[in-house]
Image (spheres, grey):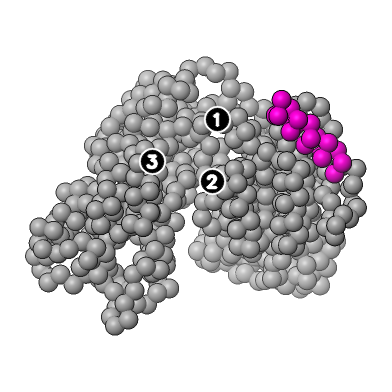
Amino acid sequence: MIGFIRKKWRQICVLLAALCIGTIVGGCHIIPISDSSSKKGVSSIIGVSQANMREEWRMALIDELKAETEKNDDIQIITADATGIVNKQIQDIDNLIGYGIDLLIISPCNEKKLQDKIKEVYDSGIPVIVMDRAVEGFDYTIYIGPDNEVIGQQAGTYIAELLGENGGNVVVLSSRPTSIQGAERLSGFRSAIYEAGGINLTELSLVAETKDAAYDTVLAAKGIVKNSDVIFAYSDNMALGVCDAVRELGLEDQVKVVDCDGFKGEDEGIDLVSEGRLKATVSCPIGGKEAIDYALSILNHESGVPKQVILRSNVIVKENVAENLARINAKSNDDGRKIKVGYSQVGQESNWRLANTKSIEESAADFNIDLHMENADQSQEKQFEAIRSFIKEGVDVIVVSPVVETGWDEVLREVKAAGIPVIMSDRNVRLENNEENLTTTYLGADFMEEGRRAMRWIRDNIQSDDHEMKIMEIMGNEGASPTEERGKGFREILAENTSYNITYSDYGDFTFEGGKKVVREYLKRHEWDIDIIFSHNDDMALGAIEELKKNGIKPDEDVKIVSVDATIEAFEAMVRGELSCAVECNPIIGPQLMKAVRDLISGKQMPFRIITDEKIYDQSVAEDYISKRRY
Ligand code: GYE
């Protein structure tokens, strides 16, 4: 009964708000309401707080959200335009909550300044989907967005290939971009062009990121443009202006235009590519479809909702327009049939791995997946064998957690030739030539961020006034993606802090014995002079602790120890006062993985990366959490 009254009351509120469009009440703007507010019998209301409705792609997001909402009878959305003002966006969120929303979708105009508000909403129990700009930390339900740096890089790489070995002259429409997206695309573009080498880059400064400004700038710089091979613009809007100007100058046959956005619709990127006016457009997925999809999963309390979804962007050229449009418009269809999955697992090196294997095996059954898992005992050769046997068996999907990052190209090409899609789970691969489409998506942790977090914690908690702090790094196995990236992320923050230095670094292969060995070897040649140990996982940290104690060195007193994974054993060591801090790496990825498998088979566009939820714990909170740990 109470639920019924609440629902009715909310519908009245929504209706009232709808009547008040554009009016001002109590000094604050009433929120414009989407068309879907008139739906009857709706069970959930989604509030959408948009940073502004000036930028083209932000309006496209609202349109996509509305279109997706229309397809579902039991949800409706209310939208609010913050007009680019932080305080207005905070007020909008309060208003939306006042209307009784069940879930908030926010595209923040300033991710730093809105972080606390987002956390407040999330902590109050209302799920929050953050779009487009990731806020720091994990105090939201899920983040969905593109990787604009990668989008720019894809454009740069495409142009470099187009020009071939001889290179050429490229003009980029630059400006101090008013949008962060623009800035990131430009930076990704520049780095790809410089990496390719042999290309002369001329930057033309724009007064605004608009079609007219692009048109005027190209005409004004006709001397430069006449000598160029390609013009790059980082949005569809600007690209249209460039195309018009190039036509005006009679240079259509000589100067090729490439851009980012790849929207569909008249005079947008895909349209211009089909007409041959644009040579290529790199699509920037808007994410509205995915947001409503995940909103439904969250509202239905389904399992398998990850923490971050980084959307896929594609290089669209004339030859693949039809294929891309088909993918964009594709209707996903899961008939619930049993799916056969071949999984090549790394081994059994750590407690993390055991928990990971268990999670994958347990959730396969829940998602009606027939799982065939092969354990590779840390051998890439064995992984190749397993993958080839999966091809023979004719599985529907192959999932690989690769022991090392490189050397996968050949076997993955074989899988592709057999028409079997591949998902990378927990660890990723690095392919020669960045060959696209050999894998569909990566699901796992953000290892770089884990490394950064470890060093941030050290910076904030372990200081000395009188000497430079010596750090020992105990790495995982050589060439594994968590080893590489944790090391990189850690060093990124380390570089900003001159009072710390990594003075010793060795591989411990992610095992307890490996951690012991690194400390033992060090002690053979040195007096103990290390202030901090950064261990790439808990097992190695625990091994190191045992070896330190054997040698009369007191963990946490004589040396602080920080590790990654945050397994129960790490919590026990924190409670005993031996381990100082554990950065979480979540092994419970079974449900997200199985959801991704089902999505893949049902025809959904796979994102680039699906990232799991993670936190950081130290001795001050270990006791409170230990009983709740699931691994
Ligand atoms: O941190 C470590 C394991 O790939 C994330 O591998 C995984 C790592 C994990 O053995 O304990």
Q: Position of residue 381 (x, y in %)?
A: 26, 37
Amino acid type, mark 2: Gln
Q: Which element carries disc 2, helix, strand or loop? A: strand
- The numbered dot on residue 628 is 3
Check residue 12 for magenta coloring: yes
Magenta stretch bounds? 1-17
Disc nearest the viewer among 2 and 3: 3
Residue at position x 76%, y 30% from top? 5
Name the element at disc 3: loop
Q: Residues within 10 Å of mark 3 (few under 14, many from 20)?
A: few
In the rendered view, tell whether residue 94 sits above or below residue 184.
above
Q: Which residue is mark 1?
A: 302
Q: Please give the name of the residue rendered at 67% of the width and 49% of the height, measured from the top-left corner.
A: 106
Q: Is residue 512 left or right of residue 341?
A: left
Viewer-closest of 163 and 473:
473
Three-letter amino acid code at the position of disc 3: Lys
Label 2: which residue?
Answer: 308
- Label 1 packing within 10 angstroms: few (<14), some (14-19), many (20+): few
